[in-house]
Image (cartoon, rainbow, N blue to C red):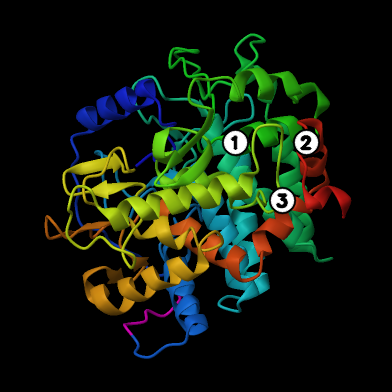
Amino acid sequence: MKKSLAYHPKSICLFILCICLSGWVFSQKTVAVPAGSIPVSGIQPNLSDSALLDIVQRQTFRYFWDFAHPVSGMARERSNIGFGYGHETVTTGGTGFGIMSVIVAVERNWISRDTAARFMLKMVNFLLKANSYHGAFPHWMDGATGKTIPFSRKDDGADLVETSYLFQGLLCARQYFNGDNKTERELRNRINWLWPDIEWNWFTNGGQEVLYWHWSPNNGWAMNFPVRGFNECLIMYILAASSPHERYQVSPVVYHRGWAESNFFKNGKDYYGIKLPLGFDYGGPLFFSHYSFLGLDPRGLKDRYADYWEQNRNHTLINREHCIRNPNKFKGYGENCWGLTASDTYNGYAAHSPTEDLGTISPTAALSAFPYTPEYSMKVLRHFYYDLGSKIWSEYGFVDAFNETKNWYADSHLAIDQGPVIVMIENYRTGLLWKLFMSCPEIITGIKKLGFESPWLTK
């Protein structure tokens, strides 16, 4: 399901419409296990923190390796069939998260570097032939053919946000696979063919001072969704300012008058005694502090509006404190069980947050917050693994969500939830993906142009 919806009344309406049209029909998954698969691990007692993190990262990686689409290598949208589409449905943004997970897998010796490079080259060659629109990819496509699968009747073309998540991953891969051999050279070259081709300025819809989320060859700008912050889409503006093709770059005014101009950008209020610099009341779902920051390093990242480390940490602490205080008296909530973000739930899918709390905990929320709240996230991880155990631990890591009040435990996994668990735990442990993404010279140029401060600007 498309989690990457800005927390905005228009996007929620579009989301509900999509749910109604699709009928919420799920069926059991069928998995073709490739050669070199990652072994499944059951619950193991008395693990050290480091060993537990290893197991969680590795088993979650199985989603992007053992369950990858066999033709394209791209990430399937979800582990069960949903919304009337079959297992051919792959997701652009989730694939970007999966690419970053492949890098982690090489670094931790779960797969060989050569195997990973060949896998990545297959994927990039597929993308070179897949449907794209002014250089941007659709949200969903057929993993065998590269043809667009509409997300809704009018959302049948470019999705600039999902494309940004994909290229956040591809740029990390370009930086990581720097070997002087045929496979890695070809991989870098092909990424460098795709990256400059995105016509970021096209998505200003005729020169407006804001980026638009969607464009369709059949419906034009009918989705009519200018993207204003603060939400999960910051990375889109960073990449749009960083394009290596000067003709397609956007100017700083698009960031300052588009992204930073809305009635839900600046906040500055306290919630549970914790100040929130930006965003909706109580911060919104936690994926706001994850998706853009899988590669974009928030440590010391500041602009005229906020300190983004403070923003993301405080957003997390507010979400945690809400669950500890538990004003709705849901079963299971507490200091060892918190984390509200968008995920499956007992009656469909919802963007869970303190202001939309259904009693559903999404494991990705607290686990992807490891860099911001390591001690608190580790307590949650141990509770999930040892106390809830087989109720939520599965072949692809933790299931998407659970609700103890309703005695409901998902049997589904979503690419956009599994990927951040692997990547953000790795950023907590080694900073690997932050180092790679921030080593891109184009990104340094882009953030400097937009007026950001970062320790990476002086390296």
Relative to residue 373, is residue 154 drawn left or right? Answer: left
Q: Say which mark, if any, is on residue 234.
A: 1
- Marks 2 and 1, how far apart at CA: 12 Å
Residue at the spot x=38%, y=55% of the render? 320
Which residue is labeled 2 in the image? 446
Look at the image and say whether residue 365 sits in the magenta stretch.
no
Whether the residues at callouts 2 and 1 have beta carbons within 8 Å, the answer is: no
Residue at the spot x=75%, y=51% of the render? 438
Give amino acid for label 2. Answer: Gly
Determine the secondary structure under disc 3: loop
- Marks 3 and 2, how far apart at CA: 16 Å
Give amino acid for label 3. Answer: Gly
Give the percent coordinates (x, y) of residue 449: 81, 31
Determine the secondary structure under disc 1: helix
Q: In which quarter of the image is residue 331?
A: bottom left
Q: In this view, does 185 lie above or below 227?
A: below
Q: Say which mark, if any, is on residue 300.
A: 3
Whether the residues at callouts 3 and 1 have beta carbons within 8 Å, the answer is: no
Q: In this view, does 243 lie above or below 203?
A: below
Q: Residues within 10 Å of mark 2 (few under 14, many from 20)?
A: many
Q: Say which mark, if any, is on residue 25.
A: none
- Judge by depth and name the residue closer to the eye, 366 or 111: 366
Relative to residue 17, is residue 10 drawn left or right? Answer: right
Q: In this view, does 396 lie above or below 36?
A: above
- Judge by depth and name the residue closer to the eye, 387 or 265: 265
- Marks 3 and 1, how far apart at CA: 16 Å
Determine the secondary structure under disc 2: helix
Q: Is residue 309 above or below residue 426?
A: above
N-terminal of the pair, mark 3 or mark 2, is: 3
Residue 70 seen anywhere in this rendered image of the structure: no
Give the percent coordinates (x, y) of residue 206: 64, 8
